Amino acid sequence: MTDIPARGPAFASPARAFARAAERLIPESAIALITRLGVAGVFFMSGRSKVDGVLHITDGTYNLFREDYKLPLILPEFAAPLATYSEHLFSILLVVGLFTRFSALAFLGMTTVIEVFVYPDAWPTHLSWAGLLVYLVARGGGHWSLDRALKID
């Protein structure tokens, strides 16, 4: 009967080498940019579904906030434009990387409201958004952002 060698240390070195190579090949600014674009895309498309033309909020959007969303403590006539314009504005800011931390925090708040009051069973989706948003709040927009170019971040 032969002894089977332990695999831990033998595999640790290639794993470390791969991690170092990945860190060199994928700069954090690329991760921040992809994260900004991904989150912005989700929220921008949601905002676009609520309007006709450039920014005319549809009657269907108001009905959605009256009948389906029914947020407590906020009137649908106020919530609909607030959510719609926020989805547009903060998405654009994320794409260019301007006020990234603030925009991500606003979307994190919106995600929390959606999870708690609107679609509580959609937590896997909301958690994936939150993971990306927390990264942006913590790390900012990266070197490839207006925040960095303007020395805001």
Image (cartoon, rainbow, N blue to C red):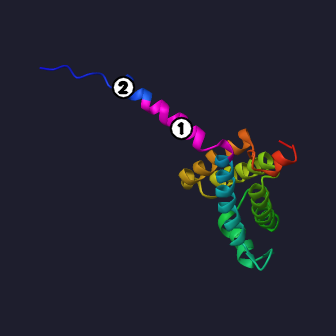
**x, y percent for residue 71:** 72, 59
Of the numbered discs in the image, which one, if any, rests on residue 10? 2
Of the numbered discs in the image, which one, if any, rests on residue 21? 1
Tell me, yes or no, whether the highlighted magenta stretch contains residue 21: yes
The earlier-in-sequence mark between 1 and 2 is: 2
Quarter assignment of residue 82: bottom right
The quarter of the rendered structure image containing the N terminus is top left
Kindly identify the amino acid type of the residue bearing the numbered disc 1.
Ala
Is residue 40 left or right of 78 when viewed as pictured? left
Is residue 15 left or right of 116 when viewed as pictured? left
Q: Give the range drawn in magenta.
A: 14-29
**SS of the residue at dot 1?**
helix
Kindly identify the amino acid type of the residue bearing the numbered disc 2.
Ala
Seen from the viewer's position, the closer of residues 48 and 67 is 48
Is 24 above or below relative to 108? Answer: above
Quarter assignment of residue 45: bottom right
**x, y percent for residue 7:** 32, 26
| Residue drawn at x 71%, y 64% as measured from the top left | 44
**SS of the residue at dot 2?**
helix
